[in-house]
Image (tube, grey):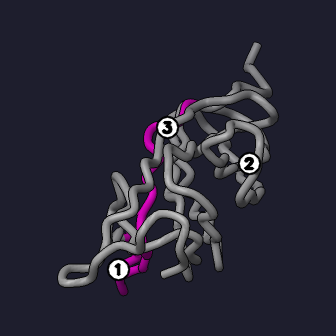
Amino acid sequence: MQPTRILPDLQCSLLCEEVRQEANGNLFLIGVVQYLRIPQVPITAGRICIFNRWTAGIGQFTESVRLIAPDQTTVVSKGESKFELRDPAMSATTVMFFGNVKFEVAGTYFVEVNVDDVMKMRFPLPVAVVPLPGKNPPAPGTQG
């Protein structure tokens, strides 16, 4: 008896600035992000990409990705996409683009990756305020 559905494994999940496709079909990632250094909060990121590779599954699936604020409850951004794996030896690559992501506060944000409502990965995204060189930070209680 052949299985008709096997929940896939998440082979990798990477946050990056951009994902492009070469003429030969290969994807390349630009600016893989491990943390964000920003000059101030709030600030809006024009674009953030989440690159996910799924494997070892059979069936049709819905992937959901959420960016969670440091308070652990506020969803800053979220998206869904569907993909299919017809054979466990196959893989599926999904790329989620989030536009105009607003970071209200510094702290550790989290990226959550789910497939069919099962969490497969949760990883931190530290966001730190680092003033621009040669620019003094505003004094506490004043606006910069």
Q: Is residue 124 above or below residue 138?
A: above
The residue shown at (71%, 53%) is 83
- Residue at image location 50% in from the left, 43% down from the top: 108
Q: Residues within 10 Å of mark 2 (few under 14, many from 20)?
A: some
Q: Nearer the viewer, residue 49 or 75?
A: 75
Secondary element under disc 1, as helix, strand or loop, is loop
**Residue where numbered disc 2 is placed:** 64
| Type of amino acid at the residue the image marks with label 3 | Phe
Mark 2 vs mark 1: in front: 2
Horizontal side, residue 136 vs residue 20: left or right:
left
Mark number displayed over residue 123: 3
142 or 115, nearer to the observer = 142
Q: Judge depth for marks 3 and 1 and give the one in front.
A: 3
Q: Is residue 106 left or right of residue 74?
A: left
Report which residue position mark 1 lands on: 24
Q: Tag 1: Cα neighbours inside 10 Å, few (<14), some, or many (≥20)?
A: few
**Tag 2: amino acid:** Ser
In this view, 82 is above or below 48: above
Q: Secondary structure at mark 2?
A: strand
Give the mark toward the camera: 2 or 3.
3
In terms of depth relative to the viewer, which is nearer, 46 or 13? 46
Q: Position of residue 40 (x, y in %)?
A: 46, 72
Residue 19 located within the stretch drawn in magenta: yes
Label 3 Cα neighbours within 10 Å, binned few <14 / some 14-19 / many ≥20: some
Name the quarter where the N terminus is drawn: top right
Label total for image: 3
Q: Which residues are magenta?
A: 9-27
**Where's residue 121, x and y in %?**
56, 33
The disc, 2 or 3, on the residue closer to the chain's N-terminal end is 2
Type of amino acid under label 1 = Asn
